[in-house]
Image: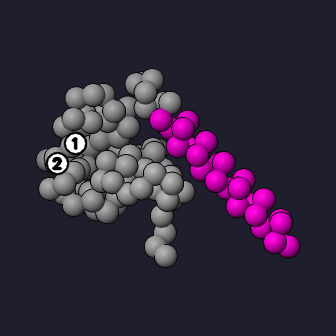
Amino acid sequence: MENKTVFLQVFGESPVLKVLDFLVVNEDFDYSMTDIANLSQVGYSTLKLFFKRLEKQGIITKTRTVGKAKMYRLNFSNPVVRKFRDFYWETTKQRVHEKIKEEKVVV
């Protein structure tokens, strides 16, 4: 089994979810579109299909320009993004607690 986050295991691996998953886990940094596509394992052309929509809705924001590359990250000033991050980590926490309980029962 490949290494999938708990969030992706529960909610599936749509390209949008893979990008959001990557950006939540790596929220301390900003990334170019190319990096986001490669590191989230989404094709660049697929990313381009929905990237502008995420930016327009204020889910991601441009942070700076490095050479020709525009850098992006999740927009944590957006309350929806903050709630999504809380939901993401709560989902992970609940799943981990379930696994711990299962292991205690087996032992």
Highlighted range, magenta:
84-107
Magenta span dominant secondary structure: helix
Q: Is residue 49 above or below residue 100?
A: above
Give percent across and percent down for residue 90: 61, 42
SS at circle 2: helix
Tell me if I can see residue 26 in this picture.
Answer: no
Amino acid marked by disc 2:
Lys
Amino acid carrying label 1: it is Phe
Identify the residue at the far bottom of this view.
1
Tell me if residue 3 comes above or below residue 5 in the rendering.
Answer: below
Q: Image quarter for residue 52?
A: top left
Query: Residue at (45%, 45%) from the top-left corner?
Result: 24
Residue 59 in percent (x, y) is at 33, 33
Residue bearing the label numbered 1: 51
Residue contact at pointers 2 and 1, CB within 8 angstroms:
yes
Question: Is 79 within the magenta?
Answer: no
